[in-house]
Amino acid sequence: MNRNTATITRIDETLTFQKPTVEDGSAMWELVDNSSLDQNSPYKYIMMCEFFAETCIVAKEDEKVVGFVTAFIPPEKSDVLFIWQIGTDESQRGKGIASRLLNELLKRESCNDVQYVEATVTPTNKASQKLFKRLARDHDTECNVSECFSEDLFPGDEHEEELTYRIGPFSK
C-alpha cells in the first residue's frame, strides 16, 4: 500500500477516521494552536504523519481535521502504544471523538501486539484522566497511574509534573 493512501473508516455520514497524511500535519498543528494543549512545532505533526502514520489517526468532517491522535510503539516496548497527544476541535468536544479515535487505532494491524496503552498526563488535565480511565473501563482492564517526569525536569516554572497512565492488558 502506498504510504500516503489512507485507510478510511466511515463512522457516520460526515465523520471519517483515517491514517494521517503529511498534508494533515499543518491542520493538526492549527487544531492544537487553537486549544489549551501543549503546542509542538509544525514539523512534529508533519513528521508523525510521515513516519508514524500506522500508529496515528485523524478524524475528518467534510475533509477537515477535527480530531487526531499521535502515537508510536516504543522500540524497547513492542507491546505498548504510547499516546503522545490527542486533540479534538472545539466543535467536536463532548461527542466521544477521542475515545472513538483510540478504539479505532487499537483495531489496526499495526497494534496487533499492543497489550498496553501508555500516556503521560498532568494532574490538572482532568479530561485526559477521564478518557484513559474510560478506556480501561470499556475494555474491562486496569488503569495504573505512576510518577513519570517531575516538574523540575521542565525549563521554567510553567509545566506540571507528568504522570504515566498505563492501561491494560488488553485482550484480543
Image: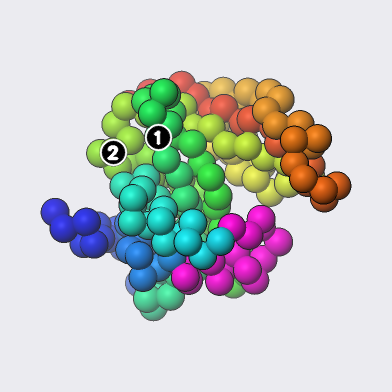
Q: Image point 21% across, 62% down: which residue?
A: 5
Amino acid type at image mark 2: Ser
Amino acid type at image mark 1: Ile
Of 155 and 28, nearer the camera is: 155
Q: Nearer the viewer, mark 2 or mark 1?
A: 1
**Is residue 129 highlighted in magenta?**
no
Quadrant in the picture for residue 172: top left
* Residue 12 image offset from top left, x and y in percent: 37, 66
Quadrant in the picture for residue 39: bottom right
Q: Which label number is shown at residue 110?
A: 2
Please tell me whether residue 95 is drawn above or below residue 126 in the rendered image. below
Would residue 119 be found to the left or right of residue 103 on screen? right
- Distance (Cα) linking label 2 and label 1: 9 Å
Question: Which of the image's four quarters has the N terminus?
Answer: bottom left
Task: Specify start and end residues of the magenta stretch as a single range.
Answer: 26-40
Of 125 and 172, nearer the camera is: 125
Please tell me whether residue 69 is drawn above or below residue 34 in the rendered image. above
Q: Image point 33% across, 56% down: which residue?
A: 50
- Say whether marks 2 and 1 touch (CB < 8 Å): yes
Q: Image point 25% across, 39% down: which residue?
A: 109
Counting residues from the start of the chain, the first of labels 2 and 1 encountered is 1
Of 172 and 148, nearer the camera is: 148
Q: Secondary structure at mark 2?
A: helix
Would residue 60 be found to the left or right of residue 83 on screen? left
Q: Which label number is shown at residue 104?
A: none
Determine which residue is flagged by label 1: 73
